[in-house]
Amino acid sequence: MFDNRLSLAVAFSLIIFILFAIIGVFSLAQNEEMAETLIQTLQNEMFAFVADDNPLVLAGKLFFNNLEASVLLFIGGATLGLLTIFILMTNGVIIGFVLSYASEKTGYLPILASIIPHGILEIPAFLIAAGLGFLLSESLWTEFKGQGDAAIDAKTLGRKFIVIVIPLLAFAAFIEAFITPQIIDLVLQGV
C-alpha cells in the first residue's frame, strides 16, 4: 500500500512543508504587527469553529474540515501539483508563524500539548494526501507524454487515499476533540 514512489512523494511534501514553516517562523520576527493581526484572525475563526460544540460534533467538524483540505491536496495533483504545492506552502507558513508566536507567548509545552496528540496522525495524513497528489500529477504528465493511463493510476491512488488518509483523519479528529483538550488542561494546571 505504501510503496517507494509514495514514500518519496511524501518526503518531498514534508520538505516543502518544513521549508515554508521555517519561513513562517522568520516572517514573524520581521513584522510583529502583522503577527498580531494574523493571530487574532485565526483565533476568531477557531473560536467560531469550536464554540458551543460537544466533543462528538467537534470531532465531526474537525474531520470534515481536514478531509476537505486533504482532498484538495490530493486532487491538486490535477493542476500538475501547483495547487498541492500552494496548499503545503501556505499551511507551512501559517503553522511556522503560529508556532513561533504562540511559543513566545506561552512557551513550548502548551503548544506541544495542543499539537502532538492529534498531530501525530493529522500531519502525516496531510503529507500522504499531498504525496498522492504529486503522484497523480506525475501520472497525468506521463499520460500526456503518451505513456501510462492516468485514470487507472488515479483509481489506485484514490484507494490509497481512502485506506490510509481517511482513517488517520478520523482518529486524529477524535483525539483532537476528546483527548487533546484534556491534555492541554493538565499542562496548563501544571500537572
Image: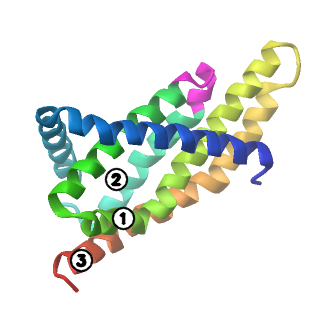
Residue 174 seen in this snapshot = no
Residue 108 on image: x %, y %? 28, 64
Instruction: Name the amino acid, label 3.
Output: Val
Q: Residue shown at 22%/39% (left/top)?
A: 29
In the image, what residue occupies the spot 40% across and 65% down? 116
Q: Residue furthest right?
A: 147
Query: Quick check: is 78 in the magenta stretch?
Result: yes
Disc 1 + disc 3, Cβ < 8 Å:
no
Specify the principal SS of the magenta part: helix
Q: Which circle's residue, 3 or 2, is located before the other in the chain?
A: 2
Image location (x, y in percent) of residue 162: 63, 50
Three-letter residue code for mark 2:
Lys
What residue range appears in magenta?
75-82
Label number found at residue 187: 3
Q: Secondary structure at mark 1?
A: helix
Mark earlier in primary sequence (1, 2): 2
**Quadrant in which the C terminus is drawn:** bottom left
Determine the residue positioned at 34% across, 53% down.
61
Q: CA distance from mark 1 to mark 3?
A: 15 Å
Lower sequence index among marks 1 and 3: 1
- Residue 28 x/y as whole percent: 23, 39
Depth check, mark 3 against mark 2: the one in front is 3
Q: Which residue is mark 2?
A: 61
For this rendering, which residue is in front, 155 or 181?
181
**In the drawing, does residue 89 fall left or right of residue 9?**
left
Q: Residue furthest top?
A: 145
**Crowd band around label 2 with a 10 angstrom C-alpha radius: few (<14), some (14–19), many (20+):** some
- Residue identified by numbered label 1: 176
Q: Is residue 153 left or right of residue 63?
A: right
Distance from the alpha carbon under mark 3 to that under mark 2: 25 Å
Residue in the foreground of this view, choosing between 103 and 57: 103
